[in-house]
Image: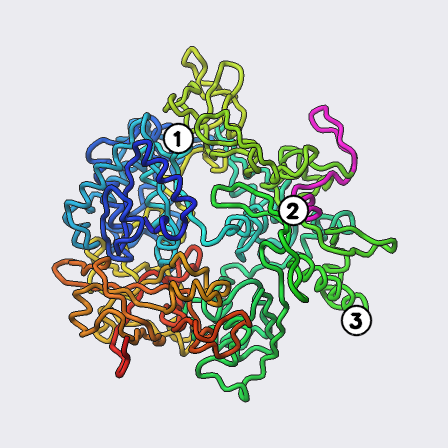
Amino acid sequence: MGSNAAENHPISFKWVQRAIENGATLISVDPRFTRTSAKAHMYAPLRSGSDIAFLGGMIKYIVDNDLYFKEYLTEYTNASFILNPDFKLPAENNGVFSGLTETPTGGTYDKSTWAFVKDGRGVPVRDKTLSDPMCVFQLLKKEFDRYTIELVSKVTGTPEDKLKAVYEAYAQTGTPEKTGTIMYAMGWTQHTVGVQNIRTMSIIQLLLGNMGMAGGGVNALRGESNVQGSTDHCLLYHILPGYLTTPHTGWPTLDSYKKAKVASVSTNDPLSASWWTNYPKYIVSLLRAHYGLNATPEEGYLYLPKLDPGVNYSWLKIWDEVYKENIKGVFAWGQNPACSGAHSNKVRQGLAKLDWLVNVNIFDNETGSFWRGPDMNPADINTEVFMLPCAGSVEKEGSITNSGRWMQWRYKAVEPPGSAKPDGDIISELFFKIKEVMETEGSVFKDAFTKMTWDYGPKDFFGKMTAFSAHYAAKEINGFFLEDKVINGVSYSKGDLVPSFGSLQDDGSTCSGNWLYCQSYNATGNNAARRNNKDESGIGLHSEWAWCWPVNRRIIYNRASVDLFGKPWAPQKPVIRWNGAKWLGDVPDGGWAPLNKTDGSANSASKLPFIMKPDGVASVFGPGRADGPFPTHYEPTECAVEKNLINPDQLMNPTVYRFDREDVGSDLDTIAGVCDPNYPIIGTTYRVSEHWQTGLMTRWQPWLAEMQPANFVEMSEQLADLKGIKNGEKVLVTSARGSVEAVAIVTARFKPFLVDGNTIHQVGMPWHYGWRTAKNGQNGDPLNAKPEVYTYGDSANLLTPSIGDPNTMIPETKTFLVNIEKLKGGGE
């Protein structure tokens, strides 16, 4: 659900097919019948943007039929916690949770009523009978009581018999001997309720006891091989490496930062490990990785950029600031925002307002050559563009971390061509040049650069780094001892690699560029380079193949896979088990003995299994989210229905940042109206196997261009008949923001949805195309492109809106409104 793995993640799907051979059931839920659907035992269509309604119906089905794993739910989740009596659900509070306040950019919640009732020790009060009307379980039951199969079918367009079949099949995994898993991708995240889509399935997995189990979990299929690694190493504005919080100006000192973070995760419950209380060790070691002994950790913290509290620095906000001329220069590093960014026309117009643009890529692209593109007049554009050619993935050495968190080392196969350099060399050269300017010309940022360590390669006689080495960087990410140290009776010398994050210190004696990766490259060597394929686990852990964060644990929260005595819920496929003295199997999520002793009494020295959560248990109720502690169905911002049948008083997510409001976004941030007659069709975007991301590496290849030569729009036979469009004809797809020419693909894979008695059509477009592969090899195609082989069309993101999830600001590109017209004179 939210993923077409057979086409877009074929290696992952290999293991799905293996599971099917072993008796597993595959369910495909998607707006269109995909290649994954063709391999599935059952397929259920749903209208894009109605995932929470679909999954909410499953929650009701599981609860109403007592199919949940009660012992797991009671002991290992917060289902038994008692909530503040003033907390209100949307059904009793005009479609929203208690505490909503309207702001100029969108609503925000005062979460004071979302708090748990606590005892005299400050520990949440629990009712393990799950009967108290204010316990999380009863409130969950009450919230989803509305999600009947009949109502869910009206909202999603999924036939009732399909819903019931899916619910029956998946709910069977609520028994200990069975496990269910979910594979999702951008189809879930790129919505204004994207985080809540995933939260809903997480709740289902907790109800069924599928977290921490072999074959369980909620599995994100990433858009490329190293998305997990880049996220771990602070791809996003609000996190530092290892998911440490980016400091803001409300924490002016390191001490204030540490106190705030520790206070936010502290607990008085002796059974909770609350592992994030180790925050000071990880942030101090990170600052030491930045500055070594050249600056104290306190000084290093002052050099870190600080966010302004409450200010958004996400992708959509950055391009809004670029368009408003508040950002003067942009590094586009290994990306193509002129095609990949939501509302690409706004991005392209913003590029024309910059003073300078640096495009670091293996080829030129629409971003670097935006000034040559459609509706651009180079004479009116003052942006100075620099192209820095870089090495491709096979032309450099380094690591990737896949969606299973496995860090795998890759080696250079060939030298990069011409003047192209690996990214590490490029950024090192930039750093040393900036440092030189700082030293000679001075700056308020001088110390932040001149005191920074940059020991990422061998040095010459004069101490100058001669080349970048991924091994040097990997060792710093792991971390060193900066002074002699004795830990738990073991002596370490200055310069030794830290064995694992358990040895990191908050006194400045250790450095680590990312605490989660501490153990990846230590005294045993480069663990990411290991290639021992033996599997002693019997369940496919392959613990000596590569390395997995944290501390080579292959299944996180694996102590939830056993009962209170340490016995596996599923003994035929144990992840770990207690032998009376120690844990066997995977690296346990904490080495404490089981929660109960053999005589049945509680073990006060033990810890609950969800060690990263402050209360030690998983969150059925999640008060950390911006738009609600429970998921609830809201319609997309570009809405094809007039009424939210589940929350009649609130049509859309009230906490979304609204760029389309006056004095918030720009004149280009247009959103179609509810049931806008000018745009009566739901649009979505997706991928095809033959092209990669925006097509930068694939549109130039004649054999791939021949296989997928044109941007297409896939539509149902019924919609094609309605519009008078034939298969293969050229059409114009238009949204409130722009238009894209495409080839019509008329297929039975899309069918109209019957939503509350009304017929609604949906179409889909791949987003791999751009104007630079326009007709007959024009506009600067690479030399190896044959003029007679070309691709046709432009980016589907010219159609998508500047609107995003309130938690992550991921754009809502999987559901928006369009219209389709046959191009006059447009033949096949």
Checking the image for residue 513, the label placed there is: 2
| The furthest residue to the right | 461
Q: Which mark is residue 76?
A: 1
Q: Is residue 176 left or right of residue 226?
A: left
The span from disc 1 to disc 3 (Cα, nearest Å) is 58 Å
Residue depicted at 76% across the width and 40% down the height:
482
Q: CA distance from mark 2 to mark 3?
A: 29 Å
* Mark 1 vs 2, N-terminal side: 1
Between residue 644 and residue 470, name the one nearer to us: 470
Nearer to us in this view, 399 or 513: 399
**620 in relation to 98, above or below:** above
481 in the magenta segment: yes
> What residue range appears in magenta?
471-494
State yes or no: discs 1 and 2 in contact (Cβ < 8 Å).
no
Quadrant hosting residue 574: top left
Question: Which disc, if any, is residue 441?
Answer: 3
User: Tag 3: residue type?
Assistant: Glu
